[in-house]
Amino acid sequence: MFIDLDLISFLEKTKSKEMPGGGAVVAYTGALGAALTLMVGNLSFGKKSFESLDEEAKKEVKADYNKLESLIEDLKLMVDEDAKSFDKVLDSFKLPKDTPEEKKFRDQKMQEGYKIALDVPMRTCELIIECMKLQRSFAKYGNIWAITDQGTGTALLHGSGEAVLLNVIINLQAINEGPYKDEVIEKLGRYQKELKELYDELMGSCYKRLEEMK
């Protein structure tokens, strides 16, 4: 499993033909972005500036911390889910296509395979968007001396979300016209818009707090 590799092995595997693609990589970089956000939390808890917040604010950050921990575990699973997501497509390529019946069956299996190859990166993007939403409390209440780590986490999450949607765009070309394709196109546009809005909001907050330090 790719998620169990050490950092150097993962890096070397990424350079090779054995790596299934960018989707597995960005599921991990997304998890890193969320992990940096948790670091902001750990550098905030117990500090005078954090403990002086009202109870509702502290409760919000700690609840978001726990949710992010769970989402990181989900993203770790997506590293290997993405690695397997194209297997059904590759299997369908091997099916015979000598008769009309065989061609029809092969096309059916190919469509099923491409839907899996689409659904996995879509789920990864959904997890990344949820992580970015949870960054809001850390951006607002987190230790100001760690605010650049929030910004770095935002940049990693945004880049990972945008990158994983590239897999959706390319695999969508192989999907037959119909309700499923229309639904994916609608979600794709919505996720791209949401990623940009969250990035602008969170990075804007990061830069604003940096200005406050001057």
Image (cartoon, grey):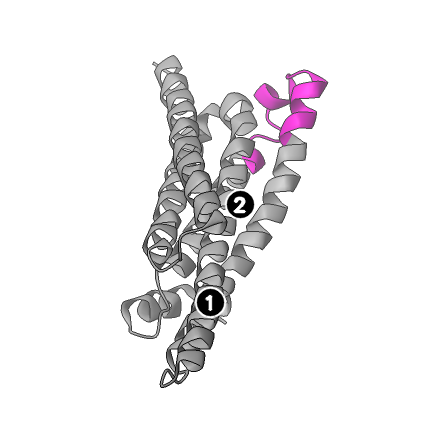
Examine the rendered structure and indicate whether residue 193 appears above or below residue 11: above
Q: Where does the C terminus fall, quadrant-wise?
A: top left
Residue at position x 56%, y 33% in the image: 134
Where is residue 165? Give x, y as percent: 38, 48
> Residue at the spot x=39%, y=66% of the render?
10
Q: Is residue 44 magenta?
A: yes
Residue 33: quarter of image: top left
Identify whether 18 is placed above or below 210: below
- Residue 85 can be seen in this image: no
| Three-letter residue code for mark 1 | Gly
SS majority, magenta:
helix
Disc marking residue 113: 1
Circle number at residue 12: none
Q: Where is residue 77? Give x, y as percent.
A: 55, 60
**Residue 116: x %, y % from top left:** 49, 62
**Foreground residue among 178 and 190:** 178
Q: Amino acid at mark 2?
A: Leu
- N-terminal of the pair, mark 2 or mark 1, is 1
Q: Residue at x 50, y 72 (%)?
A: 1
Residue drawn at (66%, 24%) of the image? 58
Mark 2, residue position: 127
